[in-house]
Each structure stands twice: as C-alpha cells, then as structure tokens.
Amino acid sequence: MRIALHTKVRADRIAEYEAARQEVPVELTDAIRAAGAISWTIGRWGSPRASAFERGGTDLFHVLDCEDYGRLLAELEKLPVNVAWPARMAELLDVVHDYSDEGADAGLPVVGELP
C-alpha cells in the first residue's frame, strides 16, 4: 500500500533538519523495514519563485510504500529507537508525524492516479 503524509519543518530549523535526516539511526531504518516498509521518500516543497535555499520550503511530503501502514505504526510505536526519533524531530518540526493508532488514518487522501 502507498501512504502519503504531510509534515512541516520549522523555517529556522531547515538546515538542522536536513542534517538530522542524514543521521537516521540504522537501528531505526532496520526496524522500519522489518515492520513492512518497502520505501519511504520525503520531499521538501516551496515556491518555485523563491531563492534556491527557500525553494525547498517548509512543507515535507512523505511517500511510504509498505505492506500495512497500521501494522507498521503498531510495531514501531513502543520501540525505544522510534520513541527517541520522533522526539528529536518534534524539536525541528511544526507539524509532526503521528505514530499513534490515530496516525494510521492520517494519510493524505488520494485524489487521482495514473490509469
């Protein structure tokens, strides 16, 4: 299944966020894969008229391919490494990823697909 999510980085923490993304703990990426994730891509979007740095903007769009998103969240929710990572991200984000049971229904609605 494919899930699309939206989070938002704080404008004054973009560089720190991007640096943190380069240091995701291997233990966490292994746990995400073991929970059924096939891929997880995050893009940063902003105005095409902005400067090169600002062009990425503060809106983060996640595309996650996984076997079962609800199961993935349930398996990750209590893992210490996954508790630590969202806490770290919360320092950098205005809108955070919801790892709770309610988060399983928080994906962006699909409005179209290539036939």
Image (cartoon, grey):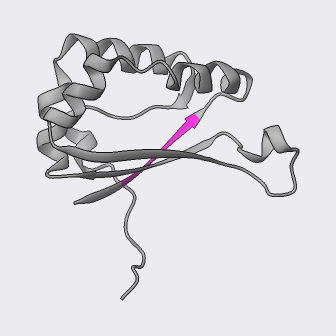
Q: Is residue 7 above or below residue 30?
A: below
Q: Quadrant of the N terminus?
A: bottom left
Any magenta on residue 67?
A: no
Q: Which residues are magenta?
A: 4-8
Q: Is residue 33 above or below residue 66?
A: above
Q: Residue at x 13, y 33 (%)?
A: 74
Q: Residue at x 80, y 40 (%)?
A: 54
| Residue 24 percent across, percent down from the top left | 41, 21
| Residue 92 percent across, percent down from the top left | 57, 21
- Decide whether the magenta segment is chiefly helix, strand or loop: strand
In the drawing, does residue 74 fall left or right of residue 9? left
Q: Quadrant of residue 28?
A: top left
Q: Is residue 99 above or below residue 27?
A: below
Q: Residue at x 45, y 14 (%)?
A: 88
Any magenta on residue 6?
A: yes
Q: Is residue 3 visible?
A: yes
How many marks overall? 0
- Residue nearer the viewer, 15 or 92: 15
Q: Quadrant of the C terminus?
A: bottom left
| Residue 4 percent across, percent down from the top left | 39, 55
Q: Is residue 82 visible?
A: no
| Residue 81 percent across, percent down from the top left | 27, 13
In the drawing, does residue 96 fall left or right of residue 40? right
- Return the residue found at the far bottom: 115
